[in-house]
Image: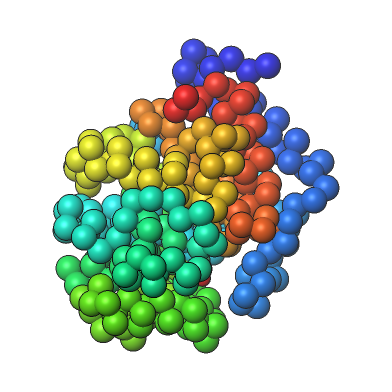
Amino acid sequence: MFSTPTGLPRVGRFEPVLNHIAEEVSSLTDRGRPADYIPLLAKADPQRFGMAVAEVDGTVYGVGDWRHPFSAQSITKVFTLALALSLGGERLWQGVGREPSGNPFNSLVQLEHENGIPRNPFINAGALVVTDRLQSLTSDAAGQVLELLRAESGNPGIDFMPEVAACEASYGGRNAALAHFMASYGNLLTPVPGLLAAYFWQCSIVASCKDLALAAGFLARHGTRANGSTLLSKSQAKQINAMMLTCGTYDAAGDFAYRVGLPGKSGVGGGIIAVVPGVCTLCVWGPGLDRHGNSVAGVLALDRFTTLTGLSVF
Ligand code: DON
């Protein structure tokens, strides 16, 4: 129905496909349910939907609520990982693995069997290790992630949401358990209370589809930042994309790869970022989640995007 966008005239080339997808999403009857572990997320309206595509040169297209800020949550884990790898290099992998977990993102069960080394950087335990390493390198992991998002999106208005950070802390027993358990194995470099605070602040960042699609651009540009400087080597960018493909949507990563065919990372705020290396980055938002914690409308929209345009890594 749509020819491959790379063959189309530049101006407005993604607009028809985005409009078409928004139309399809509008007739979706079961959009899942917003995350309800904290009241601020539970209030989100599952009917909202936005989608943005940012080309590698920074040209950005969007549809629906694509400029509406939402809780980025675990999408920020990609940016923490990028900074930890960029500043600390390969030694990160002594403390966190690179395998899909096949378990829910907040699961505790594998950690004891695997001696306090989490399966990958995108489950909560693994993200805590990555934030810990960034915290030990910079003393302000959450601030560094915020700065990266602001710089890459060009939007200095992206910010933390203190109410969300406070809620995360008050409902954060499971993350606290994960952190203390890993500390007991000697797998944390910084004190648990400060690490948890940094992790909760990081989760509380609020940004729009437009912001996040632009901010993830370095993953499509093989590690090059929006200003042309290098954040990651080509091979580190490849590694993060590979990990997003295999682990970025938790215990649904196989199904996501099957349907969408792109590296992706979801958050319980209902956002998902995805990368077409060398071409563009995408961000979709729809607050209703499936049982794995991934946006129902978001996965459908990305599935339709890669199907209609032929743009995928396969
Ligand atoms: O750690 C938590 O429980 C949340 N603040 C982040 C969870 C999240 O987004 C995982 N994603 N799907």
Q: Is residue 24 left or right of residue 38?
A: right
Q: Is residue 230 left or right of residue 148?
A: left
In this view of the protein, which residue sits in the foreground, 59 or 196? 196
Q: Residue at x 70, y 30 (%)?
A: 20
Q: Is residue 10 left or right of residue 16?
A: left
Q: Position of residue 245 (x, y in %)?
A: 44, 41
Q: Residue at x 52, y 59 (%)?
A: 103
Counting the numbered discs, the total is 0
Q: Position of residue 53 (x, y in %)?
A: 51, 37
Q: Residue at x 36, y 80 (%)?
A: 181
Can you see residue 105? yes
Up the image or down, 49 lies above or below 21; here it is below
Q: Residue furthest front?
A: 113
Q: Position of residue 287 (x, y in %)?
A: 66, 58
Name which quarter of the figure residue 184 lies in: bottom left
Q: Residue at x 54, y 83 (%)?
A: 171
How is colour applied across the structure in the image? rainbow
Q: Position of residue 261 (x, y in %)?
A: 52, 32
Up the image or down, 208 lies above or below 1; here it is below
Can you see residue 145? no
Q: Is residue 247 left or right of residue 52?
A: left
Name which quarter of the figure residue 48 lies in: bottom right
In this view of the protein, which residue sits in the foreground, 209 or 244? 244
Please state, as top left, top right, bottom left or bottom right, where the N terminus lies in the image: top right
